[in-house]
Image: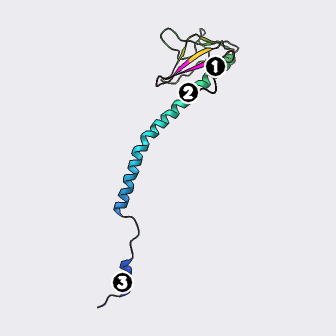
Amino acid sequence: MALSTETLGRRAQPCKGFTLIEILVVLVIIGLIAGVALPRLYAISQSFELAAQRATLLTDISNLGYRAYTSGQAAEIVSAAGTPPTAAQTPAGQAPRLKIPAGWRIEAAQAIRYNFNGICSGGSLTLVHPDDSREVLALQAPLCKPPSDSAQP
C-alpha cells in the first residue's frame, strides 16, 4: 500500500514553538544580566538617597533665617565641645530646628546666629556625609544661603 502525499505533507510540517534548550539558554542569559545589574542598581539607589538627603539638608539650612523670622525666635548653629550639632539650638529652646538625616553631621568652627528678624551672622559650616566625606559651605551674611553651585559628592 502506497502512502498518500497528504499524509506525508502533514508530518513534514515543523511544530511551532520553542524548544526546551532555547528556553533554558534565555533563562541563563537573563540570570547573568540580573546578577550583574542588581548590585549596581542598589548602589545607584543609595547615591540618589544621599543626594536627596543632602538637598533637603541644604534647603533646611537655606530656610533657617526665614523660619527664625516667622517664629520670632533667634537660633544658632553651634558645635558644642566634642559633639557636633544635631539641630539649630537656642537658649529659648523654641527656635526653628534643623532636621539632620541619620548619619550626617554638621560642624561649625564658630556659632552661626540667626536673629529673630532672620538676619544671619555668617560663617562656615562643614557637612560631614555618612561616608565621612566633608563639604565646606560658606554662609555669607545677611542671608546665609548655601551656594547653589555646591558640588555634589
* Image x and y of residue 15, in percent: 38, 71
> What residue did someone put label 2 on?
54
Q: How crowded is mark 2: few (under 14 residues within 10 Å), some or many (20 or more)?
A: some
Look at the numbered disc 3 and give the secondary structure of its residue: helix
Residue at 59 percent of width and 20 percent of height: 137
> What residue range appears in magenta?
126-137
The disc, 2 or 3, on the residue closer to the chain's N-terminal end is 3
Residue at 50 percent of width and 8 percent of height: 81
* Image x and y of residue 88, in percent: 58, 15
Vertical side of 14 occupied by 124: above or below: above
Amino acid identity at mark 3 = Thr
* Image x and y of residue 102, in percent: 49, 24
Q: Which mark is residue 64?
A: 1
Which quadrant, please, contains the N terminus? bottom left
Vertical side of 93 occupied by 99: above or below: below
Look at the numbered disc 1 and give the secondary structure of its residue: helix
The disc, 1 or 2, on the residue closer to the chain's N-terminal end is 2
Vertical side of 43 occupied by 135: above or below: above
Residue 85 lies within the magenta run: no
Residue 136 lies within the magenta run: yes
Q: Quadrant of residue 70?
A: top right
Q: Which mark is residue 7?
A: 3
* Image x and y of residue 58, in percent: 60, 24
Near-viewer residue (114 or 133): 133
Amino acid identity at mark 1 = Leu
Look at the numbered disc 2 and give the secondary structure of its residue: helix
